[in-house]
Image (cartoon, rainbow, N blue to C red):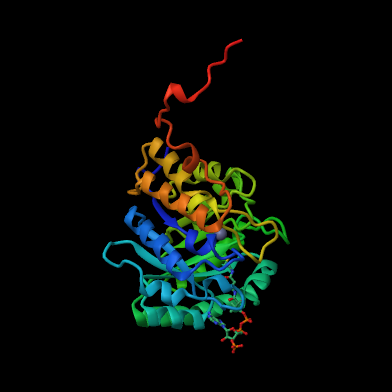
């Protein structure tokens, strides 16, 4: 068994979680939520995106948000960037990390960023230069890595080809994104094993959505392959606005609960994180899929007086 004893969680709620929300979440609310994540000990946060505000209006306030985040801890504040223009904006802000993204499949890349995979990749060569000049590390994400809602299966050869290009650009790692929840444990195992064998120097992160209810099962498959970096979102909110039937990320509190119960450290305070998730629920004004935020951890006991006795 190859399981890590500690994993690094990236909280993607402020970006993946909020990006599809139709009602604008006020900038001050976003700042509060993110600062509370930092206070809960989250080591890495995708706080927003430097994308076109016409494509994703919810994240138009990325600069204002970043300027008022608590920088006094080691939390890495990462932003999503699709092209050189986004990299210039991220470099101006001096974010801690840039995350570039494309989709493994041509059709979803076209829907999401209006260009071919090759066009995205050649743009990333410019991003790499801009980031290098600004001293900012870049991580490369691959959306639809475990299946595309328009094309079906994605080959591990395609993942390898993109990961090699990321490595040539000097990126610090690759994150495999399951945009519409098409991953299953054998698919995760195959993809991770293939990349570990063919692009061994590039650290792997996994980004699951719970669209088909097996997001955390896929995490177990990743842990069994030794993967120690996972993305998740508070309350399980999330989803790509440019993919059909996209639903929430795996839920951060549920993930932390599972990992801690397995003796795997995250450095995150579950109770504080659950409080942030409850806050998100009131901000959004609807029930979120997270379970532990509602039920509490297993040893949160109840008074017998609060429960009726079944008398016949
Ligand atoms: N940040 C802000 N504005 C940007 C931008 C960026 N990173 N990249 C392009 N733009 C602006 C251009 O300046 C131009 O503005 P103008 O018309 O006022 O001159 C306009 O967008 C069109 O530029 P172009 O390069 O032709 O972009 P496009 O229309 O082909 O759109 C993307 C490409 C990548 C900018 C757009 O598809 C996008 O932002 N996608 C992000 C989707 C996303 O975040 N999905 C969720 C993540 S999974
Ligand atoms: Zn996602």
Residue at the far left in the pictured view: 72
Which quadrant of the figure has residue 258? top left
User: Looking at the image, is 85 positioned above or below residue 223?
Assistant: below
Q: Residue at the spot x=66%, y=65% of the render?
A: 105
From the viewer's perspective, tell me whether residue 159 is left or right of residue 234.
right
Q: How many marks?
A: 0
Residue 124 location (% of width, % of height): 51, 77
Q: Position of residue 117 (x, y in %)?
A: 62, 73
Q: In front: 92, or 188?
A: 92
Residue 251 image point, x, y percent? 51, 48
Task: Kindly identify the residue that appears in the image at 34 percent across and 52 percent down.
Answer: 40
Which residue is at 45% across, 81% downward?
89
Q: Nearer the viewer, residue 243 or 31?
A: 31
Residue 225 visible within the image: no
Whether residue 283 is visible = yes
**Location of ligand 1 given as a quarter of the image:** bottom right
């Amino acid at each position: 068994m190859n399981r890590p004893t500690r994993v690094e969680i990236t909280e993607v709620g402020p970006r993946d979680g909020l990006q599809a929300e139709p009602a604008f979440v006020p900038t001050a609310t976003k700042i509060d939520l993110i600062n509370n994540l930092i206070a809960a000990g989250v080591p890495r946060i995708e706080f927003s995106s430097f994308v076109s505000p016409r494509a994703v209006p919810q994240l138009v306030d990325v600069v204002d948000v970043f300027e008022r985040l608590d920088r006094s801890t080691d939390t890495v504040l990462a932003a999503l960037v699709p092209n050189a223009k986004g990299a210039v904006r991220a470099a101006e802000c001096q974010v801690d990390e840039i995350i570039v993204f494309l989709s493994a499949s041509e059709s979803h890349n076209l829907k999401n960023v209006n260009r071919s995979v090759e066009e995205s990749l050649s743009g990333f060569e410019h991003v790499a230069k801009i980031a290098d000049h600004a001293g900012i590390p870049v991580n490369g994400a691959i959306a639809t890595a475990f299946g595309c809602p328009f094309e079906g299966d994605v080959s591990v050869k395609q993942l390898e080809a993109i990961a090699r290009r990321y490595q040539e650009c000097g990126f610090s790692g690759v994150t495999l994104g399951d945009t519409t929840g098409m991953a299953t444990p054998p698919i995760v195992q195959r993809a991770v094993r293939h990349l570990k064998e063919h692009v061994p120097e590039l650290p792997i992160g996994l980004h699951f959505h719970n669209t088909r209810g097996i997001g955390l099962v896929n995490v177990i498959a990743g842990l069994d392959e030794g993967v120690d970096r996972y993305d998740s979102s508070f309350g399980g909110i999330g989803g790509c606005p440019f993919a059909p039937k996209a639903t929430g990320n795996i839920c951060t509190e549920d993930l932390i609960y599972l990992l801690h119960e397995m003796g795997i450290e995250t450095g995150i305070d579950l109770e504080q994180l659950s409080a942030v998730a409850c806050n998100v629920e009131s901000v959004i004004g609807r029930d979120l899929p997270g379970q532990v935020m509602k039920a509490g951890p297993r040893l949160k006991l109840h008074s017998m007086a609060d429960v009726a006795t079944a008398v016949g």
